[in-house]
Amino acid sequence: MKPTIKNILAGFAGSLVSIALFIGVLWCINKIQEHQEEKANLPLNEKVLAYLDKHDIPYEEVDTFTYVFTYNDEKYLYIYDPEDPEYMLIMSSWAIRNNNYHALFETANELQWKKKFIKIRVENDRVVFSIEQLVDVQAEIDEAFTRWLKVLTSTAIELSIRADLGCE
């Protein structure tokens, strides 16, 4: 075969390989996007359970849409409302050893103001911390859920420390 024909055939073969690689890359990108869309379109309940599984956070189903999970050795309750699929409630209840309810209410109000999106309810010898959020169905919740858990934990610890020390 003449060198010119060999060069043309080699160039043609190289072009076919390049086109095949390009199509393969486009196919992979498409599959990744499809997977992300499927993941984004999951109901909030499934996203939360996937988050718990991914982070090895043990949980158990209390009833159809209520789950108890343990994070940093504390129990939390996650409630999903199928009638309102964008609404999420996470709460935790901590025992408190402070009988000065006036100071406890003041501290709870101050922490609610400081943290903005957390609710604190004082009930006899327990304090209930909760976060209620509306979550867009398309939203990824990994970063937000981690933040919510950290805020709940840090608020509960701060209130507990301040209440035990009698701080106002």
Image (tube, rainbow, N blue to C red):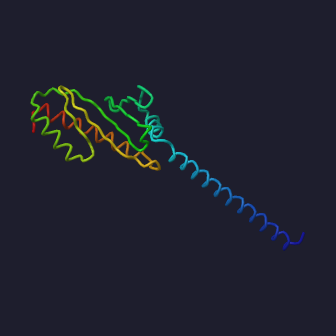
Above or below for 10 versus 88: below
Q: Residue extending furthest right?
A: 1
Of 133 and 55, which appears nearest the observer?
133
| Quarter placement of the N terminus | bottom right
Is residue 68 rendered to the left or right of residue 103?
right
Above or below for 68 versus 117: above
Instruction: Residue 108: give x, y in percent of width and height.
Output: 17, 39
Q: Residue at x 24, y 29 (%)?
A: 94
Q: Residue at x 71, y 62 (%)?
A: 19
Above or below for 6 versus 83: below
Q: Residue at x 27, y 46 (%)?
A: 117
The image quarter containing residue 130 is top left
Instruction: Residue 31: give x, y in percent of width and height.
Output: 61, 51
Instruction: Residue 153: give x, y in percent of width and height.
Output: 28, 37
| Quarter placement of the C terminus | top left
Of 127 and 85, which appears nearest the observer?
85
Q: Residue extending furthest front?
A: 83
Q: Residue extending furthest bottom?
A: 4
Q: How many marks?
A: 0
Is residue 59 rendered to the left or right of residue 20?
left
Instruction: Residue 118: give x, y in percent of width and height.
Output: 26, 42
Is residue 151 rendered to the left or right of residue 39?
left
